[in-house]
Image (tube, grey):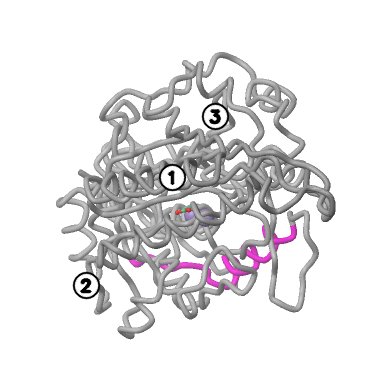
Amino acid sequence: METHIENPPDRTAPGEVQIDATRLNEELKALATFTSVEPSAEGTAVTRIVFTLDDLRARVWLKGLAESEGLAIREDAVGNTFFRWVGAEPDLPAIATGSHMDAIPHAGMYDGTVGVLGGLEAIRALKRSGLRPRRSVELVLLTSEEPTRFGIGCLGSRLISGTLSPERADALRGAQRGCEDETLAQVRAAAGFTGPLSSVRLPQDHYHAWVELHIEQGPLLEREGLPLGMVTAIAAPAGYTFTIEGIGGHAGALLMPDRRDALCAAAEIILSIEKRALATGVIDTVATVGTCDVYPGAVNSVPSRVTLQVDVRDTDPVRREGVMAGVRRDVDAIRTRRGVRVTESLVNADPPAISSLHIVEVLDEICRGYGIAAKHMVSRAYHDSSFMASIAPIAMIFIPCRNGVSHRPDEYAAPADIERGARVLAATLGKLASE
Ligand code: GLV
Ligand code: MN
Ligand code: MN
């Protein structure tokens, strides 16, 4: 006898939401193969710099997955990609989720990707649940959350929110040694993203809500034995470039008393940055010098020029500015004592982002319903959500990552935690889509 399996009835609220955890984990592994570094003993190292061949191939792969779900696809001039499940009232502001797929050099396979593929799986799960959403639900892939290529993070979401002007963006130059001649305008055109960057901006209240799923990138959830966190605020990040110019010369012949060694001066500046951040005595202040480019970079040549990229963050932007004021006083003393020239340029100084109370309440309610113990927490990493906050009420869902490790090949999130995060995301999107 022929069995007839009925389709689930259409609903305006999601029924039982079930994540296909096996498929989600397979897709995370598949995405990790789009990398310019080979797997190493340290783990699955991923390097996927924006608009490289690996990034472009990963985008094609993701679009294929979204197409097979029947999502409507739109790409903007900077490569932000929007995958829309059209709701019953398509003119209402949509509910959105998403994250990034680019990865810094020798990163892991979960940063950003859990939010993109978890978001796709959340949409699939809602469809399977029989939901017919009132509002459209959109997955957004944001371009270059990582600052590796152009020196500034969250390019796509900054342009969406109007935080970065289209002119400044197009003129951004390669931040890596040897890439200083390439501009964003050239690189995006070569990648097939043309049109004016002014068209990327979206109006305020474009979305009814934005919810990003992400690994915590810190140790708190794991230490407290909690499977999930809801982000109530994202710390305020700032970036600076310091260029130190001294006098180069022969490492054997240039006498020590005559030296104006740019790297020695840079070393003192680096230590000042660490000292000033520690001096606040507050755990929320962090400062990092993540790159140090030494010119001419030969073992038998006294460094004549050094460029430092500096990253300073705090939940309190005033305290962050206080750290930089102290660093500047130290720099003045170092430049006088060592006879070097130091110039500082601001890359970005962003405010903190605050989550929507309403979305956090919805998250609380959903976690209670699932019996999930969750905590409210601050994100010390920045995210695209920091800028999506300009055009929508936002919140984020954090899942634990092993030992709090991120931006390293041994970054790891357990499949059960990913599944739980995606399930809470799906239920939240479903609930918000019915509003
Ligand atoms: C994001 O990658 C950050 O640096 O916080
Ligand atoms: Mn990252
Ligand atoms: Mn990230």
Q: Secondary structure at mark 3?
A: strand
Q: Quadrant of the C terminus?
A: top left
Q: Nearer the viewer, mark 2 or mark 1?
A: 1
Q: In the rendered image, which residue does mark 3 sit on?
A: 74
Q: What's the amino acid at mark 3?
A: Arg
The amino acid beneath tag 1 is Val
Number of marks in the image? Answer: 3
Residue 332 locus on image (x, y percent): 41, 41
The residues bearing labels 3 and 2 have C-alpha atoms spaced at a distance of 35 Å
Please tell me which residue is depicted at 40% across the width and 47% down the height of the picture: 97
- Image position of 364 with respect to 242: above or below: below
Q: Quadrant of the N terminus?
A: bottom right
Q: Is residue 250 rendered to the left or right of residue 72?
A: right
Circle 2: element type: helix
Mark 3 or mark 2, which has the lower sequence index? 3
Quick check: 150 above or below 433?
above
Residue 331 tag number: 1
In this picture, residue 199 sits left or right of residue 261: left
The answer to whether residue 112 is visible is no
- Horizontal side of 29 relative to 398 (left or right) equals right
The residue identified by callout 2 is 369
Q: CA distance from mark 2 to mark 1?
A: 54 Å
Q: Disc 3 vs disc 1: which is toward the camera?
A: 1
Question: Magenta residues, as a range?
Answer: 16-33
